[in-house]
Amino acid sequence: MSTMNDDRLSNLREFSIESRSPSRVHSSGYRSRTYGSPTVISSSSYRRSAAPGRVFSSSMQDSMVDLSQSTAVTNELKIIRTNEKEQLQGLNDRFVSFIEKVHNLEQQNKVLEAEVTLLRQRNSEPSRLHELYEQEIRELRARVEELTHEKNQMHLDCVQMNEALERLREKLDEETRLREEAENTLKGYRKDVDDATLARLELEKKVESLLDEIAFLRKVHEEELQEMQSSLQATQMDMSKPDLAAALKDIRAQYENLSCRNQAQAEEWYRSKFATVTEAAARNQDAIKHSKEELTEYRRQVQARTLEIEALRGHNEALERQIAEMEDRHNNEIGDMQDTIQQLEAALRSTKGEMSRHLREYQDLLNVKMALDIEIAAYRFETFLTIPPLLVAVSPIVQQSIPFKNQTLKIKTAHTIAHTLKDKCTKHDTKSQVQLLRCY
């Protein structure tokens, strides 16, 4: 860019030098020609002085006319020189203003290039931010998928726990039904036990009454034996010894046999009754014991099942609370992640909008730069086209001394510079757009 500016300044300097040199040459040539005319007039008047007086007077008049003409020409030349100086001063002022404007435009161009560099850096930075945002979004999406998988797993565990709880409830209902059946059976057994106890008490009462009766019969039998012995002793004294003793022995044998038979029958009946009652009591006792054992076992099982159900119920409530907490936490995390994703997307949209705005600004700056370059080229071209016509308009004699080829070459140079600047601006604009598209 600096070399291009140097080329422009060198071209402007060459053009200013070349534009000034022809004016000097033309003015000097014009002076030589104007000042040459009075000498010619004086020589002719001198030749005419050798003529007679009429001729001398006419020559004097001619010389006066020539002097007046030369004075008018010199005045015109002075006016022309003054106008030329003023025009040159104005052209120099315009040239200085053009140079200052070119310097200002170059400074603005440098500022624009610095802004373009900053914009490129900013455009490259959002691309990195875009990559960071994309990476963060991918990580957050992976986390969301992981949490969703955990939530589904927890849901499956909850379903399995609910199924296990339903099975335990069914088992509890079955055990409750069995317990009720056992309690009903136990009630029947209790009734049987009560009946057996009443029967045993009645049998014990009967045994006691029979024992009392046996004791009473023994006492009666003993008293009868004593009475019989006393009667036998009394009769033995009256009767003869051989007959009484034999009779007593027979009676005694009969009574002893009778008492032994009665005693054996009573003992046998008592033993049979006692064995029957004992067997019934033992059977009822075994049934009662078995029922008590079953009842104890059922109670223990019911307590164990109740404790297990309470534990499972507490575990289920804990799992439900944990699932609810996890769902709330996951919902909060998902909400936070969605908010973060929305913020990132909003930041990405704002970054893209800012990037597009910077691109538009950069495009506007490039358009302004290109317009300024074209305006500079137009100013230069106008300057190059404006100076030669001014010099041509000074006098028709100067027009002959100006080399036409140089003028043509200067005009071609201005056209070439303008087209070169336009091509460079177009190429620079195209390159900048390609770089921006690559950055984007």
Image: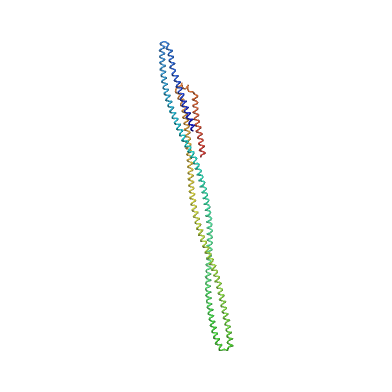
Give the percent coordinates (x, y) of residue 190: 52, 68
How many marks can you see? 0
User: In the displayed structure, would residue 376 be above or below residue 145?
Assistant: above
Q: In this view, does 83 lie above or below 138?
A: above
Where residue 292 appears, as percent x and y from the top left, is 53, 67
Location of residue 255 (image quadrant): bottom right
Task: Say left or right for 362 vs 244.
Answer: left
On screen, residue 3 above or below 228: above
Which of 11 and 223 lies nearest the eye of the viewer? 11
Place of residue 342 in the rendered image (x, y in percent of width and height, measured from the top left):
48, 46
Q: Quadrant of residue 269?
A: bottom right
> Which coloring applies here?
rainbow
Give the x, y percent position of residue 103.
45, 32
Farthest residue toward the top? 52
Q: Is residue 220 above or below residue 20?
A: below
